[in-house]
Amino acid sequence: MDDLIKEFLVESNENLDRLDSELVKLETDPSSHDLISSIFRTIHTIKGSCGFLGFSKLEKVAHVGESLLSRLRDGKLSLNLEITSGLLSMVDAIRIMLGKIQETDQDGEETYQELIEALNRLQTVGQEPAPKSDAKSPAKEATKARPEEKAAAPAAEPPSKPGTPAAPAATSEESQSAPRGQEESRARSAASETIRVDVHLLDRLMNLVGELVLTRNQIAQYSARQSDPNLASPAQQLNLLTSELQGEVMKTRMQPISNVFDKFPRVVRDVATARGKHVLVEMDGKETELDRSLLEAIKDPLTHIVRNSVDHGIETPEQRAAAGKRPEGHLKLRACHEGGQVLIEITDDGAGIDTARVKSKAIERGVITAQHAGRMSEQELLNLVFLPGFSTAEKVTNLSGRGVGMDVVKTNIERVNGTVDLQSFPGKGTAIKIKIPLTLAIIRAVIVQSRGLRFAIPQVNIQELVRVDGEQVQAQIQSVHGVPVYRMRGQLLPLVYLSQELKLSDGAAPQRGQNEARNIVVLQANDHLFGLVVDEINDSEEIVVKPLGKQLRALKIFAGATIMGDGKVALILDVVGLAQNAGILSEASDRALEEKSAEMLAKEEDGRGQKQTFLLFSGPDDGRMALPLSLVARLEEFSAKDVEKSGGEWVIQYRGKILPLIRLEVVLEERRTRRRHGNKAIEPSSLQVLVCHDENRTIGIIVEQILDIVEDRAEVKSPSTREGVQCAVVINDRVTELIDIPAIQRIAEANRTLSSEHAEVID
Amino acid sequence: MEPSRQFCTFYLDNLMFGVSLERVQEVIRYLELTEIPLAPRVVSGLMNLRGQIVTGIDLRRRLDLPEREEGKHPMNVVIRSTDGAVSLLVDDIGDVVEVTDESFERPPETLQGKVRDVIVGVHKLDKQLLHVLDTDRACETAEPAGADGAR
């Protein structure tokens, strides 16, 4: 393809992207002369270049658009929805034609006659009907303006475009409209400070810097051994320069997230207009930068989420008015850097996700059973939308709701080591949080050894490192029916021995006695924690991730390889793959749901249920209560003075997170004696708390006293008499209430959202 | 049949083999290999070739030949492939040999098994036979990775 055409395409595509956002902006601020002028110039430039390059059909489309714009600019017309839509469809048409040019070097057969006529009609709306609306029809000023604009076109183009004729005309343009002339010269000087660089060149640079980092590591190790001052100082210098170079080269690949965000106002406008909604988009942190490959990866998932929010989340103006909200919906996009990651939040103030509808849909589609659904927490129900083939759209529109949805979003984000978190507040809106790494090429990793082989574990997967001293091994590492577990702060952590997973021969292994110290790397794979036992834990370092050859790609346990400081190759462990290999994941994620429901059913309906282990405790008014032990993560004792209040809720800082505390005497209020008050001071100096968690949420339940752990058949004697209690059972010959955690959470949630801060005291 | 008439030759268990010279990136002495747990048997490990991570394929295993003697280091014939470089581990390196079509013959019918996919045919040289390898096939593991995971 002709270089000139290639350049025209690159430039025009960039301009069109800008047009989209400018047009939408213009809609909210129709009087902005700057915006109209800028849009006008862009279209004008495209038109000018088309004429020059001989794309007559494209030129015609751009020409009518330009005429319309010139009337807008001169105030002969004022912008309305129709005109904006017309202009936007013109932009689309131009984009299609550019695509054709890219493929075939021709602007295609399609002449867009309808569009041209529509645009012509728009020009005459509100004016005296113009005869045979064509380029000549608009007011004289507009026609007069055009030739001079046409001449000025080359001036508006970046100087990289060589030898465009009619350049002298730029002077006449400048003299006639001074402010615009200045603007353009400013734009030109900015343009001369930037150059276009082939992306492959940047990729190559990045690779080379990766090599340099490795060589630097080797030299650093060598110089540390030599203790030669003549070497030490240049080695130190090399170290600094390499790090700096690495940073700068990474920056060249960084692009602001606005590249993706800027497309959204248009997307939102299109969806909102099609659905008769009114949505305002607010964007924050558009300058946040991330690696371009990642930007590419998140573009589609983000677009999907935005569409979903507008299509399903935000209600129609009537519905909003009925709900007492402002007629226009708000969609907020926020991006920022957080702890070496990029955090993207998409929040809307729509209806939120109707978990009841999710539930019925899931049951209808056979994703879950009805009994099972009844036992799921709100968050569990919400997470159902991430399952393949799930869409809650009542109506399938051409925009969204085709059932390929959030599961694709989730897979795409997870492919780049990111996470998606969905929160919904019924009637108030939905919030989606996405976290992705800054770059994929260089990561921090901890180097471990097993049987003399070194492996790198990405730091993001590591929760903590634990060393169990020799004398504690027997006490802390035990086995559950032959499966090793580690007692970590009262919780049982399944252990995986790396040497066994990798089937490494024991030959090279240091003989491990019963009381040898153990090194455990606590890893997290998809919300599941497990401990990886390795022989040694070495340093943490920056490693350059290299892909494995196709011969090894089937090994899901490795994410890639890297070259260590000593020049040898080490494999990078894929924590998710490792967990799957060890059965942690499949067991946990696939079977957990079924197990849970089976367990519930067993005690709910089946009097001859199997034996289960229960945690017995006394609740308010010394009532005997119980929970299946499997639902209790830990038992903790908190000092009462550590309890804080947040939004009418009791919370405590626990392991770096805020743990909401649920007081049974508050949520199980019906039979509560009057003397108890929800907001009275905490009496005992210490609180017994059961820490329970489901998939996403961890809660603490305050109990009076923990009584015992028993194994029993838990025969059902009577159904539940109050909310929050699943049923009454007989355990150890005494009537005991089985607590229903999801229900308790729901009640606590409802209490919290009640208006007054101590609304839970309903005496 | 390979289009090129120039072959880079090498020896395995005293047999002479050759791959198309165009596909050979370089021939180097032994480099230390990092063992890959669970990898297919023919993959002997990963090596660092000037910052490039290269998968080493043990050609003796690939061709069902007896194992190399303990302690004897193989040589590397590094092959360019669409998927990055792959190194074929061989016993010794021979010369570059130029041949014509006339000396070529397809492998005998009696050559069976997975080896038949790899050996395209032989060139009848003066003193011995040059086994011509299908370069891409030689770089494959012949079985899905992990199928024979445990060694």
Image (cartoon, rainbow, N blue to C red):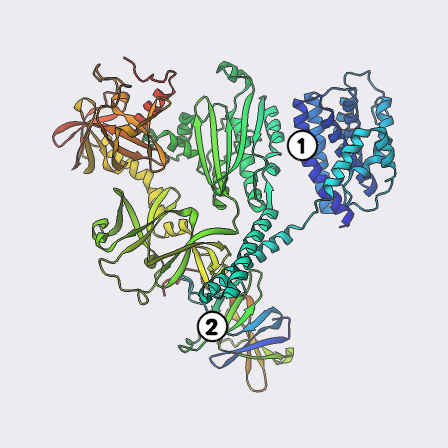
Mark carried by residue A202 = none
Q: Which chain carries label 1?
A: A
Amino acid found under the numbered disc labelled 2: Leu
Residue A113: x and y, percent? 77, 31
**Above or below for A644 versus A97:** above
**Above or below for A366 versus A565:** above
Q: In this view, does B55 lie to the left or right of A366?
A: right
Give the residue number, with chain letter if any, for mark 2. B63
User: In the image as oriented, which residue stretches furthest toward the bottom?
Assistant: B127
Residue at 56% from the left image edge and 55% from the top image edge: A242
Residue B76: x and y, percent? 52, 72
Residue at 33% from the left image edge and 43% from the top image edge: A588
Q: Do labels 2 and 1 share a chain?
A: no
Amino acid found under the numbered disc labelled 1: Asp
Q: Can residue B44 be seen in this view?
A: no
Q: Quadrant of the C terminus of chain B?
A: bottom left
Q: Is residue A755 left or right of residue A118?
A: left
Residue A487: x and y, percent? 25, 46
Count of all numbered marks drawn on residues in the image: 2
Check disc 1: other Cα within 10 Å, few if <14, some if 14-19, many if 20+: many
**Above or below for A289 versus A214:** above
Residue A255: x and y, percent? 60, 42
Give the residue number, with chain letter if any, for mark 1. A20
Front position in the image: A99 or A321: A321
CA distance for labels 2 and 1: 60 Å
Tell me the quarter of the picture where residue A241 sits.
bottom right
Q: Is residue A467 visible?
A: yes
| Disc 1 element | helix
Q: Quadrant of the N terminus of chain B?
A: bottom right
